[in-house]
Image: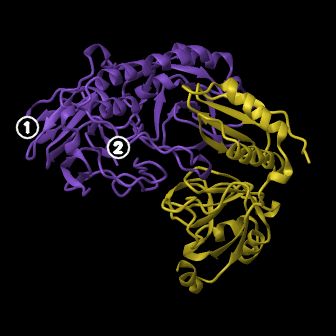
Amino acid sequence: MSLPHPNPRYRLMGDRSLLVELGNEIGPEINQHVRRLYLALETAPLEGLTDTMPGYRSLLVVFDPLKLTPTLVQAHVDGLLQEMDSASLPEPETHQVPVVYGDEYGPDLAWVADYHQTTPEAIIQRHTATHYRVYMIGFTPGFPYMGQLPQDLVTPRRDIPRTAVPPGSVAIAEEQTGIYPVQSPGGWQILGFTPLRLFDPARHPPALIHMGDRVRFHAIQKQELRQWQQ
Amino acid sequence: MAAVKVLQILASGPLTTLQDLGRTGYGAFGVPPSGAVDAFSLRIGNLLVGNPDHTAGLEITLMGLRAKVLSEMVAAITGGDMQPLHNGRPLPMWEAVLLKPGDTLSFKVAKTGCRAYLALGGGFEAPKIMGSAATNLSTGFGGLGGRALKKGDLLASHSPHTHLACAGNRLHGAMVPAYADNWRLRVIWGPQEADFPQAAKTRFLKDTFTVTSESDRTGIRLKGPLLPAKEGLPTSIISEGVIPGAIQVPGSGQPIILLGETVTGGYRKIATVISADLPWLGQIRPDHGVKFEAVTLSEAQKALQKREGTLSRLREQIGSRPICTQGTTP
């Protein structure tokens, strides 16, 4: 069965990558098209393609400019978009992510509760009630951008970003939630901590959570961390 | 074959890392390429000492590396001119030289360029992670334990002795790149040039930008005329994949040339540096001037072929000397 596909918009990013835009908004449908194209390219690679980066609404296709031209890449992508078939899509994985919320594990939980004029418990309840879609991986290795947050959890970024967010921090910003896999600077509001190891360079694939996967958070007590960390 | 200790680091300078041509194919997992910022210089060095292109060498930033040689080996120093010394005497660059145990190598401050590369015949031993030995400093993996070199580090190689006959290989003087203090970088517009008013695009090409001291392996930060997006547009865009050379303009209106330590970004890219000029990004340093010149795709392709021609000519020249063995690196 063929699914309707959007009209792609192609933009050059230099002489060795082509940005394929499949829409201009953040939403599950466009992102699903991006995933289909990304997976189609994985199964039908073109000699000379070196990398692909799926985004919210676009796929960046990187190639060796000595072997390929943007015209050839575009023709290949056009062909794949014509043939894309829903049946060929592997099921996305669903990850149950344990989180210790609040206190030293979630230093912004109290602020976020105040902001929404509710209790930390209500914030936890809202954060754990939704199945999130992983729109893309980026910023740092293995960092999943997930959405959408329920409307009553949409929260601005911190005024002053932290210079070092600890690995495992589960955070929210605007309509998104994410997990910091490695220590990095960051301006998102940290609600909790997960003991899951999201990025391990020695593992294959190195990222635990992939673009297109689903994530559901659940609250655990800090006494339970030890069993998860084994 | 057991590894042989080849170098002991006596002083690391501000930043010296192991880098090869970087890791490709892991962008969907958020893994950036890393690798030599001036990949051209590293490739020349590897050719001179008989290594495959993708062999890891040392990337020395600005100054200060000192090292003691522990084994007989050949090495080539390419890239920025830090006036390298061999036992206190000037060491020729862009040439494979024979080094003996007990020798010392030292680097002063870069007279030209920003990064020097030390390629060792037989390569440095470092585990390949996702197909590359490149050091990723921000996440802390690759190279030597995911970190910069420090005093006391011992570096090893599997096969330095099989490359000794490469000594004497050199790049013809006419092919040695000349580094400026004022750079002209060729770009292709986009992908979001249409979001900038004509006045900003004109200034982007006409004016000279200055490289700020906040520049590092993640990006070259420029100061110059402001490049605001068209009125009414939000500061950021929906995040998307990026490549090294993409010139993003955040809310400050001051452009940043991205390097190989990130795979996504949420700011507009007014233009992207062409592949032929990417190596220059490794030699631009704070206070240098940068001017941009817009070219067409076909001009970019011709420029790249011309640059690759230098490597092919060197490859032919060295290939005619079969004593310099190829492909023995693990």
Residue most toward the bottom? A223
Where residue A108 appears, x then y in whole percent?
62, 67
> Amino acid under label 2?
Ala
**Badge 1 element:** loop
- Residue beneath the point at 72% across and 35% down: A20
Numbered disc in front, either 1 or 2: 2
Q: Residue at x 65, y 57 (%)?
A: A144
Locate residue A118, reporting x and y percent. 76, 72
Secondary structure of the residue carrying numbered label 2: loop
Looking at the image, which residue is at 35% across and 25% down?
B315
In the figure, residue B14 lies in which quadrant? top left
Observer-nearest of B326 and A201: B326
- Neighbour tally class for label 1: few under 14, some 14-19, many 20 plus, Cα within 10 Å: some
Q: Amino acid at mark 1?
A: Asn
Mark carried by residue B87: 1
Question: In this view of the protein, can residue A8 be seen by the observer?
Answer: yes
Q: Is residue A23 above or below residue A197?
A: above
Please rate how many residues cluster around mark 2, counting C-alpha atoms within 10 Å: few if below 14, some from 14 to 19, many from 20.
many
Q: Which chain is the one coloured yellow?
A: A
Residue closer to the observer: A132 or A14: A14
Specify the colour of chain B.
Answer: purple
Question: In front here: A75 or B245?
Answer: A75
Closer to the N terminus: mark 1 or mark 2?
2
- Above or below — where is B61 with respect to A217? above
Q: CA distance from mark 1 to mark 2?
A: 24 Å
Which chain does tag 2 point to? B
Residue position marked by numbered label 2 in the rendering: B56
